[in-house]
Structure formats: structure tokens, C-alpha cells
Image (tube, grey):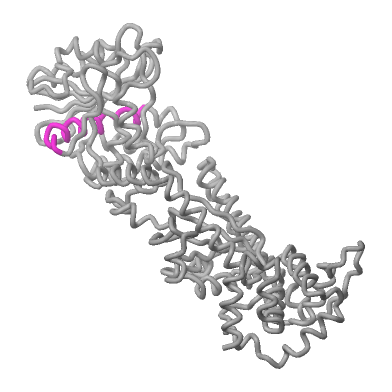
Amino acid sequence: MHHVGIDLAWGERQPTGLAVLDEAGALVHVSTVRTDDEVVEALAPYVEGPCLVAIDAPLVVRNETGSRPAEKALTRDFRRFEAGCHPSNLAKPEFRDGPRGARICKRLGLDLDPRSGRARRAIEVYPHPATIVLFGLPRTLKYKDKRGRDVELLRSELLTLMTHVESLVRTEESWAALRGAVESATRKSQLRVVEDQVDAVLCAYVGRFADRHPERTTVYGDLAEGYIVTPSLPDGAASVRAAIQAYAEGHAELSMAGQQALALVTSILDEAGINYLSVTGRTKSVASFAEKAGRLRDGEPLYPDPLTDITDQLGVRVITYVQDDVEAVAGLLSDQVVVHDDRDMGQQTASEGRWGYASRHLLVALDAARESQPAYAALAGRLAQVQVRTVLQHAWAEFEHDIRYKGSVPEEHAREFDRRFTLAAGLLELADREFSTIRERLRAEPVAAVPAVDDDPRLDPRELAAFLAGQYADAGWSRTEHYAWISGLLLELGITSLGELADVLRPTAALGLNERMDYRYPPGAVRRLDDALLAVFGDRYVDLHGNAHRAPLLRQRLEKLRG
């Protein structure tokens, strides 16, 4: 029995690749032709007896517009590998008189039914998804000529494909000549001649695979509306589809949990008075989950149990000003919630002797006290990934991600872009260090007060910030709006001048408030003042109107201070 492959051009002006494998799977013929007569003549000796002809071209097209059902189904499974189908429909001029592949099959007397048991038959195949399954590729090889792909890339990718094919098919002298032609090619047209023949050999093997391993083969669609035959994705694909469906069904509740995770992290940082630029959150979309769930490594699912193994379904991102603040946020979270994993991606990058992505990734869950609180009901029992990075690290990561992964970097510029991204990462790391040094120098120097510019009875937030920088020289900066907020609390206490505030705080110097609170992170200046006012005024401070939203937390802290 012969297994024949046809990489069929949609018209007779372009070359069509032909290949034939014998009973033992050895390559006995490979060539290119153009016309239907040439196809029939070249294959006649091999299709007189039992044969299976695998054709890379539509054989059955009934739909007036859009894609065939088979194409839609295959694309759903293989889109994540960049192996989706181009649409076939009767609106395209090449199908108005019926598919070319069907005409050739009629002339050769082949049965087109993929379920047929006849000795002489034909099936429609598609090489791209076949390469994903047969060779365990993470995405299709880029050996097809498209914009932005130079000869060097096309040659390299085509040679890679040929090496993979050689692992499946016993080749002969004509194949060796094809490899030599690719290795010496200087023009894309020279590669195109070989490409069609390599695809034809791959088609022949897919036909052989479908014939020998029907249990590992999937037929997308049917004879009535059109079909495509290809090796099946690993068995894990079924569990992946089930996981995606379950994720979609629970996405509304998961989104609520995402909102609660964002509120949790924001409230913890604000309560601690830690300075940050922004806190944002997101719940992974169904499409993003599906793409990640379907990733393969060496042909096997990267996430065997996607619902459990994909841990960034809920994400919170904290952007700080300098690296010290990243450490402060990580320390605070470890004190307030349960941290299941803590990875410093910057340290991992540096340990490999290079510059690049830098971010602190913490996998967190609710602590026992918050598990029973209604405000976090949707978050209970779930994990959230918290990414903490400086504003410069964030800028690099976002730009690099958009350009390299969401955008399209021309292959001929890939190495240059790698070098430039590395250079930028090194410069930004240096800038981060300089910003940290600037802040440390400012902490060590006395800060001049800025005179008030209006008749607001509250202490001016800028004056208060300057005062606290001197009062708590070892404290970190707090968020700008927090100085204004605590200035309002001081007004409720009747404190309207820095002199009055200094008199109130003087006795607290001997109380050892930091030791009593046992901080595992460096609290900000506003938090230090907050503790001091709580220690001095006690219940009166808790009962202030401006503290109504956090009275329970303040009472817990007051007990700790008195303890």
C-alpha cells in the first residue's frame, strides 16, 4: 500500500508538491508539478492499487461565506499554537467550480469519505497542526514566506522541519538533494520549491499515521460540510477543555474574588502607611486562561490540572517608587496574610548573570482571621498572585511584554532587540539604585517646612510631611494623600500647629512604640504618627469621626500598645 501526499496549490500557476511512501514508510517519490494532468500522470503508478492520498487542500466546501465548521473546530484547539485554519467558502473564486482537490480525486477514482474502508481513498489533511502533535512544538515553525521573515529565518525553520521529518520517514537521495538546496539557498523562491515538497512528505506521513493509528487521529467535521484529518492532541486536551469550561462557568464569582483581593492588599498597605504609586488588580480572562491551559512542553501539557496549577487567576500589582518599598510591601504582606510562595524574579535573573525582568511575586491567601469575614467571602479558599515592582521595573516589563509577546518583532531584528532590552534593563536598575540613594540622602538631611498658602485650619500637609521627616528620620515616606488625611484627624483632636503636635509627641519618645508593635516592615511616617496618637489619646482617638471606617482595627492596635 502506498501513502501519498499532495501539497496542492489552489491554482495551476503555483507549484504543487508530491510525495509517496511505500509500505515500509520509505520515501520513494518526491517532486513538484503544476497542472492537474501532471499530478495525475506523476501519481498514476502509485494509486493503481491500495492507497491513501492525503491532500493539503479543501476537498469539500459547501458554505457560502466564512469558515467551514471543521476549520472552526480545529482552530479552537490549535489557535494557541498559531496553527489555525484559513477560511474556505464558495465566495472565493478558486472554489466556484468546486475544489481542485475534489476534481483530482475524481480523476484518480478515490473515495473522499474519511470513514471509508475502501482500498483506494483520499483525505484532507493540514500539516501545521500535525507538526504540533507529531513533533511536540510549542508553536508552528515559521518556514512560510510572510512579511518580516528573511531568507535566513526561512532556511533555518525549514531545515528544522526537515530534521523532524527525517525522524519519521526513511529518506533517499532526492531528499538529500532537497536538503542541500535549502542549505545553499540565497533567495526565497529557491526555498519555496523545496517547501512544497517537504509539506507533501509531511502530508504523506499524516496519511500513514491516520491509517495506522486511527485511535490517535481526530477527524474535524464530516463529509457533508467538509472535514480535516490530523493527529490528535495529547489526551490531556480533553481535561484542558473541561477545565476551561469550568473556569468560564465560575468566572463571575472569581471576578468578585479578584475585587476583594485588590481591596485586601490596598487596605493592608494603606493601614500600614506604606508609600506606593498604585495598586491594581485583574481576574484572568477566560481566553487568557484557555491559552495558558493549553501550553505544551515536550508534547505534554505544561499544566496537567489547569484549575489548580495556574496560580495567577487572581492578580494584584503593587507599583512602588524605589526598591526599598518593594521589600517593605513584601514584608508587610508576609505579616498580614498567608504567603504560600515568594519569588524574587530580579534575583533569579541576576543569579543567571544577566539583566532583565525584575519583580517580586508572592502567592497569598487569607489569614485565619479574615477567612470568616463577609467582606472576603468570595476570596476565601483561593490564592492570589501579588506582583510588587518599582515604577521603573514596571515600565520595562510592560514595554517588553507588549513589544516581544503582544507585538510582532521582525525575526531579523530579534537579536538586536534582545540586546537593547538588556541594555535598558541595566540602565533602569542603575536608575533605581540612584533614586534609592537620593531618598536616603533626603532622610538624613533636615527638611525645611513649606509655608501654608491658604486659611485651612488644618496643618498644611506639606508642613506636616517636613515635620514628620525630622521627627521620624528612620521612617519611610507615606502617600501624599495620607498626610492630608491625618492632618484632618489632628484637627479633630484640636491640634492646629506643629508646636502643639511636638508637645503631644514628646512623651511618646520613651514609650518604645516600635518595639511594642513589633513591626516586620518599616512603617511609614504617617503610620508612626498614627501609632503615637493612638498611644496618647487611646479610645478618644479611636472614636474620632475620621476613624469610623477603621475603628475595629484601631482597637486591636490599641490593645497591642497597652499589652
From the viewer's perspective, is 292 left or right of 400? left
- The residue most toward the top is 97
Residue 205 painted magenta: yes
- In percent of the image, x 60 and y 67: which residue is there? 269
Relative to 39, is 242 above or below? below
Viewer-proximal residue, 8 or 245? 245
Q: Is residue 198 visible?
A: no
Above or below for 14 versus 519:
above
Q: Main secondary structure of the magenta part?
A: helix
Q: Is residue 146 left or right of residue 27?
A: right
Q: Position of residue 540 (x, y in %)?
A: 69, 77
Q: Please provide percent x and percent y for residue 484.
A: 77, 65
Residue depicted at 26% across the width and 18% down the height = 225
Quadrant location, the N terminus: top left
Q: Give left or right: position of 236 versus 371.
A: left
Q: Viewer-proximal residue, 342 or 422?
A: 342
**Relative depth, front residue between 183 and 51:** 51
Q: Is residue 68 magenta?
A: no
| Residue 448: % across, % down | 87, 75
Placement of the C terminus among the 4 image quadrants: bottom right
Q: Residue at x 57, y 51 (%)?
A: 400
Look at the picture and state if 482 lies above or below 503.
above
Tell me if residue 82 can be seen.
yes
The residue lying furthest to the bottom in this view is 510
* Quadrant housing residue 183: top left
Residue 248: percent from the left, percent from the top? 38, 42
Residue 33's quadrant in the figure?
top left
Q: Which range is magenta? A: 193-215
Q: Is residue 329 above or below residue 501?
A: above
